[in-house]
Image (spheres, grey):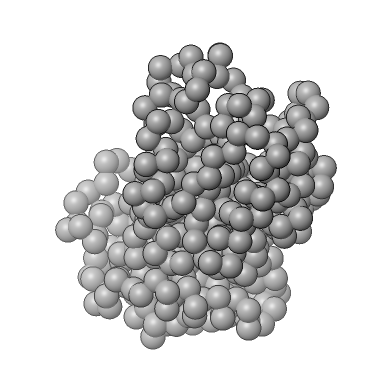
């Protein structure tokens, strides 16, 4: 499974969710899978994508929110998992592209094993799971309680191809319009 | 209010808020603020308690950087967040300010409880406190020191206008002269 397989499975399964992607591979993969859909793509601020997604989930309880994160990204902002556990929004799921590498800077290894799914399962109010194929990912997303974290195990580290450098003002305007115009999809979890 | 039933983030207040803390909290509510994200501080306690009394959703988060990104998430959704933290947290917050909120044009009002300035007794607080106005200025954030209760309404209204109308992050600096801090230990 590669990063685009993950993003593709997400947007096909839950096209109406609000997506927040972290800088680098996650943004590149989501842009490709959604044909540059109106999502909140991060171009920087490593470690901040999850709290931003938490803010969106808190602000827009009628919509499902998906945070698509690199594993290095989540490691850098890992305290946010405790904030997610504390606020426990029922409309947030976190999908981590787990390849143990900093892809955007050249594929250097992370400092150690992340084991985010296990961490999530230990924290009160948060559930964790792992998926190794796109089919498994869709299946897990259908059953994991919210807030939940799914570690998508990446064994094919192909670069998605789309630029991870986005126009921040265009991203803001399109995402804000998506929030404002979007349907109530509370009942259809990704 | 999203997830409003939960208790997390409900500030604990050991003594009654000071008059200026009540006034500042009320000015934030009057200015249309919809949520407050914060990392706790003694000078902020009375403000948070009053915001809770006014039934404003308050969200205690683990790190200042999270508060900025969380508030930016509210802002992009069209709501009006405020972020409160100690000035020493600005170091932690810079990444999400300079590489997210500011380039994305998401104006946030910041309420910073100043440490390291007049009367500080902890050496470790001094460098960041002294650098706070310059650091904010370096990333384009205007900061307005508040030393007197009589300026609270005007400064708060002005900073909220910069954030929500001009879409520029702007800060209120709560100086020690207001009282309620712990410069002496």
Q: Quadrant of the rendered structure where residue A113 is? A: top left
Label total for image: 0
- Measuring from the top left, give residue A120's x and y in whole percent: 52, 46
- The correct choice, above or below, for B88 with respect to A158 in the image is above
- Report the front residue among A27 and A158: A27
Identify the residue at image location x=61%, y=55%: B158
Identify the residue at image location x=34%, y=49%: B138
Identify the residue at image location x=37%, y=43%: B135
- Measuring from the top left, give residue A185's x and y in whole percent: 67, 77
Identify the residue at image location x=20%, y=57%: A105
- The correct choice, above or below, for B61 with respect to A133 in the image is above
Is B68 placed left or right of B164 in the picture? Answer: left
Q: Quadrant of the rendered structure where residue B44 is? A: top right
Residue A97 in view here? no
Q: Residue furthest bottom?
A: A35
- The correct choice, above or below, for A61 with respect to A163 in the image is above
Is B4 placed left or right of B67 in the picture? Answer: right
- Report the front residue among B177 and A110: B177
Is B4 placed left or right of B171 in the picture? Answer: right
User: Can you say which quadrant of the picture contains the N terminus of chain B?
Assistant: bottom right
- Measuring from the top left, give residue A50's x and y in whole percent: 48, 56
- Report the front residue among A50 and B113: B113
- Measuring from the top left, give residue A22's x and y in whole percent: 39, 62
Residue A16 in view here? yes
């Amino acid at each position: 499974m590669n990063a685009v397989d993950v993003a593709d499975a997400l947007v096909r399964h839950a096209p109406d969710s609000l997506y927040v992607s972290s800088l680098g591979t996650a943004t590149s993969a989501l842009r490709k899978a959604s044909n540059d859909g109106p999502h909140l793509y991060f171009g920087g601020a490593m470690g901040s994508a999850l709290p931003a997604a938490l803010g969106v989930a808190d602000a827009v309880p009628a919509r499902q929110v998906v945070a698509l994160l690199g594993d290095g990204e989540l490691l850098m902002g890992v305290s946010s998992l405790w904030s997610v556990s504390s606020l426990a929004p029922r409309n947030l799921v976190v999908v981590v592209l787990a390849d143990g590498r900093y892809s955007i800077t050249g594929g250097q290894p992370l400092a150690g094993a992340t084991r985010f799914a296990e961490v999530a399962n230990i924290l009160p109010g948060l559930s964790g799971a792992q998926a190794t194929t796109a089919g498994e990912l869709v299946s897990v997303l259908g059953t994991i309680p919210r807030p939940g974290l799914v570690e998508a195990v990446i064994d094919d580290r192909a670069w998605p191809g789309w630029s991870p450098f986005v126009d921040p003002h265009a991203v803001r305007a399109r995402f804000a319009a998506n929030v404002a115009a979007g349907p109530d999809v509370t009942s259809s979890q990704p | 209010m999203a997830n409003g039933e939960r208790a997390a983030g409900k500030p604990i207040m050991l003594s009654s808020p000071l008059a200026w803390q009540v006034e500042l909290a009320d000015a934030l509510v009057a200015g249309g603020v919809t949520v407050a994200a914060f990392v706790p501080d003694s000078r902020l306690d009375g403000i948070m308690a009053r915001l809770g009394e006014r039934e404003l959703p308050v969200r205690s988060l683990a790190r200042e950087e999270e508060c900025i990104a969380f508030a930016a998430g509210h802002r992009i959704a069209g709501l009006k967040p405020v972020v409160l933290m100690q000035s020493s947290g600005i170091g932690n917050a810079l990444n999400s300010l300079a590489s997210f909120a500011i380039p994305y044009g998401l104006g946030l009002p910041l309420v910073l409880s100043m440490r390291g300035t007049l009367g500080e007794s902890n050496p470790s607080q001094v460098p960041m406190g002294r650098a706070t106005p310059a650091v904010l200025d370096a990333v384009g954030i205007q900061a307005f020191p508040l030393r007197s209760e009589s300026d609270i309404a005007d400064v708060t209204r002005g900073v909220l206008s910069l954030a929500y109308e001009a879409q520029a992050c702007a800060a209120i600096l709560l100086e020690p002269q207001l009282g309620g801090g712990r410069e002496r230990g």
